[in-house]
Amino acid sequence: ILHLSNKTVRLKKINWKQPLKGKTAIVTGAAQGIGLDTAKSLARDGAIVICLDIPANKSQIKNLANSIGGHSLAIDLGDEDAAQQIMATVGSQLGVIDIIVHNAGITRDKTIANMPEHFWDQVIDINLKKVIQINALLLEKKAFSPNARIICISSISGIAGNFGQSNYACSKSGIAGYVEAMSKSVEIEQSKGITINAIAPGFIETKMTQQIPLMTRELGRRMNSLSQGGLPLDIAEGVSFFCHPA
């Protein structure tokens, strides 16, 4: 929901060709899908992008970073100290963060009656808990610049639910609720213009959704307004919109 106001504001000087020039952005889960296209879109708009993904995808994020003039950062968000690892990198190499896009996520699909406890815990940890921990630490250590942008990727599953995805839906619903609560928090209200937003994609054509059974996939496409799956670029441009200084 975008809230509009009739208050008069001072116009900013904006480089409309490269509105993010001079900004530093972190994109998690940048090796493929939405994260990859988001990194490319932010770099196109002028940002220096740190492409973060698991060590197993080190070569992919290194190639991506080289192609967009950014940097790669191999960190497993499943590690207990993942937030501290990111903070250490920010403190020693990046200075401050202007943009962070929490895109990394996993699925461990099972009906709740058949779901092992570790399936539930893994999804909640990566998709929700680590997002909260990373933001809390960066805010505490004042690692965000004034007017920084925090964007979290939720999901339509977190709004409408999805069969066999109770853990995933719970994590993505948690993201939506967390962002709404944080937007009214003391940390955000007392900051110098930091914003936090969530984007909840519907069915997007990625490697993750290719693993969904064929008929379920086709139903997901047809339930979209245009009766087709979205593309990672669609979400990337939504992220770019929320990052824009205007």
Image: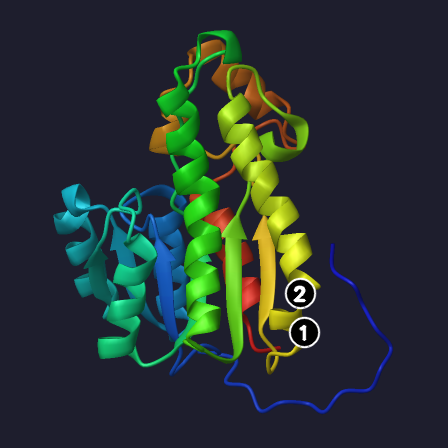
Secondary structure beneath disc 1?
Answer: helix
The answer to which image quadrant residue 155 occupies is top right
Task: In the rendered view, tell whether residue 229 sits above or below residue 77.
Answer: above
| Tag 2 and tag 1, C-beta contact below 8 Å | yes
Residue type at mark 1 is Glu
Q: Residues within 10 Å of mark 1 (few under 14, many from 20)?
A: few
Task: In the rendered view, tell whether residue 94 sits above or below residue 181.
Answer: below
Q: Is residue 53 left or right of residue 97?
A: left
Residue located at (40% from left, 20% from top): 117
- Where residue 190 appears, as percent x and y from the top left, is 65, 78
Residue type at mark 2 is Ser
Secondary structure beneath disc 2?
Answer: loop
Residue located at (45% from left, 35% from top): 124
| Tag shown at residue 11 | none
Q: Is 18 in front, or is 121?
A: 121
Residue at mark 2: 185
Q: Is 47 in front, or is 145?
A: 145
Report whether residue 200 is seen. no
The answer to which image quadrant residue 179 occupies is bottom right
Task: In the rendered view, tell whether residue 75 sits above or below residue 187.
Answer: above
Residues at marks 2 and 1, CA–CA distance in whole angstroms: 6 Å
Q: Quadrant of the N terminus?
A: bottom right
* Number of numbered discs: 2
Q: Is residue 28 left or right of residue 221?
A: left
Residue located at (68% from left, 90% from top): 11
- Where residue 116 appears, as percent x and y from the top left, is 39, 15
Q: Quadrant of the C terminus?
A: bottom right
Residue at mark 1: 189
The answer to which image quadrant residue 134 occupies is bottom left
Report whether residue 119 is seen. yes
